[in-house]
Image (cartoon, rainbow, N blue to C red):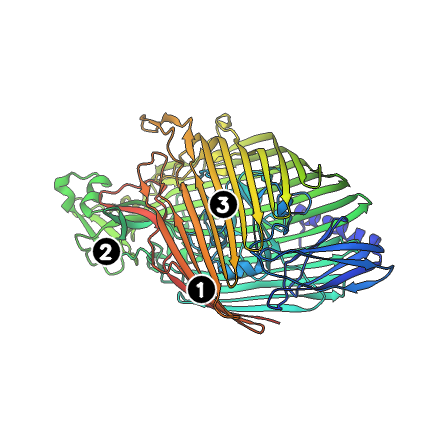
Amino acid sequence: MKQFNSSSITSFWMLLLFILPAMVFSQEKSSVSGQVFDENGQSAPGVNIVIQDVSLAVSTDADGGYTFFNLSRGTYIILVTNIGYKSTQKSVTLKDGENIKIDFHLEAESQSLKEVVVTGSSNPRSKLESSIAITTLGAKAIENRAPISTADLLQTIPGFVVETSGGEVGNNLFARGIPSAGAYEYVQIQEDGLPVFEDGALQFANADNWYRLDETVSKMEAVRGGSASIFASNAPGGIVNFISKTGQNEFQGRAKLTVGDYGLFRTDLNLGGALVKDKLFFNVGGFYRADDGIRKTGFTANKGGQVKMNLTYKFDDGGYLRLNYKKLDDRNTFYLPIPLKSNNGKVEGVAGFDPNYGTLTSANFSHLSVPQYGGGTFKADLEDGVHPVVDAIGAEFKKKIADKVTLKNAFRNTKIDLNYNAIYSSGGPWTQDGYATDVQNLAPANTGDLSYTYVDNNTALNPNALIMRADHWYIHKQMENFANNLSFNFDLKPVNLTVGYYYSNWKSNQYWNWSNYLVDVTDNPRLVNVNNTASGIAHTWNGIERITWLERDAQTKGKLNDFYVDAEIQATDNLTFNAGLRYDKNVYSGYRDNARFGAENLGVLDNNTADDAVTTIQGNPYTYWRYDVSELSYTAAGNYKFNENMASYIRYSHGFRSPIEESFYDNANDLSKLENTFVNQLEFGYKYANSFLSVNANLFHMNLKNVAFTDILADGSSENKFADVNNLGLEVETNVRYSIARLNFNFTLQNPEYDNFTGQNADGSTFNFNGNTARRIPKFFCVIRPEVDITKRLSGYVQYSYFDKKYTNQDNKQVLPAFKEVGAGLSYTVNNLRFAVDGTNLFNEIGLTEGNPRQSTSDTDVFLARPILGRAFRFSVAINF
């Protein structure tokens, strides 16, 4: 018999609580419905439609349709807004029981400030009236940008430095100059207003591991700073919210096929319609994809897909009950730093290693099998890559429970099983003599005692061939998260007040087992054996230099009880104030092993050093820890609307980020070393739009206290350092439209510097990084994207991205040069078909996004860094039906 755990029972009762009100409150009244069309006469999905003065808002469905139910007799003003189009409105007078149809035709403009946004706000508001820095992209704009990954799409957001060189998953986002070990440490990635997982910066569990873009996405809204700390925990840098499509009265579908020059085959499908007209709607979609990867591994690098579905019941007063489910089962190769060299400041590839398409990840050593301390064998499959299996089920309920009060509740229960396999560069490259002296500690006169042979055919390496360590890092994470957000909205004109309670509990169990290979430095690396011919001692076993040199067993849990209040005050027709508070009462707990690092000799290999320094967790007691967080976040802002085309705002916010998972592991024996990271921001915003030009500019100052640096180093230890950061920056996003041409230009100019960053290194030396530029953060970066309608059906674009130089580490000694990337594409639309070809990194730029944060050593002029992916082309055809 199937057993139900506590999360399943909780989910059942939450669903029951949502369904019961639907049986009680349903009733019939007048309605207004219709369809919205763009300038070409095509249906326009995702358009915002608001009935003014009664706080009712909907978005058009996939067929451009909309409906307002349960309207009383009277005259209403219906306002229609959408990004890239002029706002339009119509007046309608309703009689009792009357159902009227009104269609709208949009006229294109640069960018509308009247578009309604829901992220980072307790009540839907237009951009013009919002005192936050927010970027939005609808389904059409997302498709036009043809992102290869979620991170690739986020590069369109000013203020966000996004590294996309890891492939489809495992990428990094740095918000407004906040340095971190990577992942999404200060920004929460949401799906329909709830986090895809509560903490997006767990070790080897970046938030984009759990999220994929497909045809089910209706819109993306991204808030930078501002009110993010009020509406999400541990997210002072911002919120990125992906909003899903829901059903509509008319059955609509969209199918898409994409192929690429790197073995890509991808199918996308989305279907939506009504089970009961005007009442019960469904949407279901997903994708399947397989490809060889832009960097060539010798095996299928990416394979899998997802299914998403939702079911919506609409109440007559505009409220709804929505059930949703997602299943993701996908595996992806994660790319890491590769060997490169510098030629008078210009980055080039190493002989035999293609910098655009090469990788240390190789089919030549995809299956690991090593003996273990205490007996048995550990096995791992590199071809499984980063392989999450995600099951997420949830619901949303919104209902007007009194004349001035609206109740909204949303929950999601998520379970994740992650197998993580990747090749990390952790030592070298070395010349063969350098390896003998630096690693095996031989005297220079005895370096000839070592022989180097390939494992697969036992032939000798070329004496000039370089060698290096390539570690197989295996991590297994079992994760669970239940999140619930309950809020009450009070329409107390001129004050709109929201009071909410957010609860979340999550758990992450993880096991690590890392071994390192010795390989030659080529882009199809092969395993190398090393033997000392003088002593008869081997230093590798089947190409493995160190068996299980790192093992870890740990758990981290979080329980969040957060209360928040947000008030919007309409002081005058033009002046709006906003104030918000959030009180976090959170508890983090867990355990960690007390591994004997490199202390065990397996004793199973005769005359071989590969098993001499095994790390084991067996037989060791665990250290249990608990960390309590009680913090108040707050924000206040004022927005002044000069006219219907221009507004400005000022905002101050104070938020925080709790210590991350690696900090808890490193300091489990003494948590007094840890502090929350505090983020104080002052922002000035300016917004202007007309039919030709739109400008969104944000000047910000950030002060960060106690930022943690926790990169895992080559020896398995963590940096475990803390510092302050100050940053003054300017974000600008502009859109220009004239006749058949459009131009998008956004840039960020900033100066993030360390403060209070002095101390002592592990070797006893001291450091002083005060005034240095924060690592991996460029001071300037921009995206320029011109688009043109060549004919009525044929459109084209070019996208130019530029990233200024940055630094690998805090000492600012290793410079990552400035680089540019150019992409372009064409699309042709005829009837309900869209054909497109898109190319990325057309000039095969070797743009470095990071060095090697594991600080490996080398006795050559070769260094390790991670460049962007090489040139790739994709062709797609989509049909609407």
Whether residue 622 is visible here, answered yes or no, is: no
At 29% from the left edge and 53% from the top edge, which residue is drawn? 542
Question: Which quadrant does the N terminus fall into?
Answer: bottom right
Q: Residue furthest bottom?
A: 831
Give the amino acid at mark 1. Answer: Gly
| Of marks 2 and 3, the one in the foreground | 3
Image check: 280 left or right of 175? right
Q: How far from the left and from the top, in percent, is residue 372?
A: 39, 46
Instruction: Pick the residue in front: 607 or 488.
Output: 488
Give the amino acid at mark 2. Answer: Ala
Instruction: State the residue position of label 1.
Output: 825
Instruction: State the residue position of label 2.
Output: 351
Instruction: State the residue position of label 3.
Output: 732
Q: How far from the left and from the top, in percent, is residue 3?
A: 67, 52
Image vertical order of residue 638 relative to residue 4, above or below:
above
**CB atoms at circles 3 and 1 under 8 Å apart?**
no
Label 3 packing within 10 angstroms: few (<14), some (14-19), many (20+): many
Q: How far from the left and from the top, in percent, is residue 50?
A: 71, 53
Q: How far from the left and from the top, in percent, is residue 650?
A: 58, 36
Name the element at disc 3: strand
Whole-angstrom CA distance, mark 3 to mark 1, is 25 Å
Give the amino acid at mark 3. Answer: Val
